[in-house]
Image (tube, helix red, strand yellow):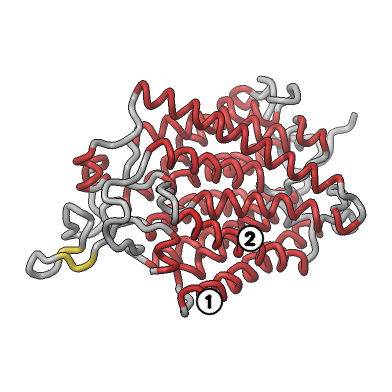
Amino acid sequence: MTPTPVDAGNTAWMLISSALVLLMTPGLGFFYGGLAGTKNVLNTIMMSLIAISVVGVLWSVLGYSMAFAPGNAIVGGLAHLGLAGVGPAAREGTTIPHSVFMAFQMMFAIITPALISGAVVGRMKFTTYAIFIALWSLLVYAPLAHWVWGGGWLAGLGAIDFAGGTVVHVSAGYSALVAAIMLGRRIGHRQHPHKPHNVPFVVLGAALLWFGWYGFNAGSALAADGVAGLAFVTTTLGALSAMAAWAVLEMVRAGRPSAVGAATGAVVGLVTITPACGYVSPMAAIVIGAAGALTSFVAIQLMGKTKIDDTLDVFACHGMGGTVGSILTGVFASKALNSAGADGLLYGDASLLWKQVLAVAASIVLAMGMTVIILLVLKLTVGLRAEGEDEVSGLDVSLHGETAYEGAGSFGERVGPHGAPAAHAVAPTAYERIVG
């Protein structure tokens, strides 16, 4: 069979998209770092940065083969171990070099476990976290990517996920919930008023995430074509719709919209539209974004009434947003827009909706079950939590020997001219940001 020629335009687009998705991980660090307290901001950013190296190396050695090499319905084989056979020739079914496809998928593998870090801010050992994301990327992400994108059983079933609703956001969001429960609450949780320590960081991080998300979603077309254009438009409208809906919800709930709320709403909209972006119409994207905002907003409020300390509300934003988007893909998808997709409930095929529900359920079971196992093993070996004194003084100093701001006090407070605390900055929950 004659090899498919490499298309220069598509290759250029995919190289740009890969770089855009990589940018999302430091963007996530700024987003999370701004929401965290001053005593943990560097540790929070580092949890995103370390994922780039740890997961990137593992992906090239083993993870890519587990996800995309020919295998069985559960996991890929070892044909691409150490990137064997991954070279400049076009990957089968695409017009881009196999090496570029691998690099693009690497960026997804990197940011997904980094999303979980928002649930454990301020209390997890850094070395334990690094080991956790390494194991999680191989035992959760790679198999799930194979199930959905690598020819595994969910793909065979007919479930669809354009850019990572189940593979990325459901898996990370529900794993974050498990991690938050197993680590327990922060010392002093809810005993002090909690506010983001740096709102401009939050907005900057959201902007970098949004910018990179175009590579994440439109790049998942694997070509500079009409489907990429559709994904670009629906991604934009999903984020805009969710941001507007979030502002309205804040007005109803608290009487005023906030910059943190606007940034959070945009990110939730991006999460929710991700699985559907290449399969649905622009008008459907508006509905999906608003639905994601409403669901995540309510989930944040409900989580705020529990004793679970998901520090930056990863479950409510990513877990619930990914769930809603994946299920609504089964409602709004249309083959008239993307022949490689499927028709959803509104276009005459109710079976797609049930396939999407099953895909979400399977992703939740794999992610939560394996996360429990990984954390139990780590708890019995290296331990999960930082020492109490380190947690109280802040992980920036105790684990990294650095401070983000000159004059930061031992409790993460900005010290005033006479030694008085200028403002307390314990990492907030999004519920407290909304109602407080």
Q: Residue at x 68, y 42 (%)?
A: 360
Looking at this view, name the residue that lies furthest to the front. Answer: 305
Amino acid type at image mark 2: Gly
Question: Counting other residues with Cα less than 10 Å from the Cα at mark 2, is it few (<14), some (14-19), or many (20 or more)?
Answer: many
Across and down, in percent, residue 201 comes to 39, 63
Which circle's residue, 1 or 2, is located before the other in the chain? 1
Across and down, in percent, residue 271 comes to 61, 55
**In the rendered structure, are the residues bearing label 1 and label 2 in contact, judged by CB atoms less than 8 Å apart?**
no
Secondary element at image label 2: helix
- Label 1 and label 2: CA atoms lie apart by 17 Å
Number of residue marks: 2
Q: Is residue 12 visible?
A: no
Q: Residue at x 33, y 28 (%)?
A: 383
| Residue 59 horizontal side relative to residue 404, left or right | right
Looking at this view, name the residue that lies furthest to the right. Answer: 348
Secondary element at image label 1: helix
Image quadrant where one finds the N terminus: top right
Across and down, in percent, residue 177 comes to 49, 43
| Residue 276 horizontal side relative to residue 402, left or right | right
- Say above or below: 351 vs 214: above
- Say above or below: 349 vs 383: below
According to the picture, the residue beneath numbered tag 2 turns out to be: 292
The residue lying toward the viewer, choosing from 136 and 17, is 136
Quarter-wise, where is residue 405 in the image? bottom left
Image quadrant where one finds the C terminus: bottom left
Q: Is residue 54 visible?
A: yes
| Residue 401 horizontal side relative to residue 141, left or right | left
Amino acid type at image mark 1: Val
| Residue 233 horizontal side relative to residue 411, left or right | right
Q: Residue at x 81, y 38 (%)?
A: 93
According to the picture, the residue beneath numbered tag 1 turns out to be: 252
Question: Counting other residues with Cα less than 10 Å from the Cα at mark 1, is it few (<14), some (14-19), or many (20 or more)?
Answer: few
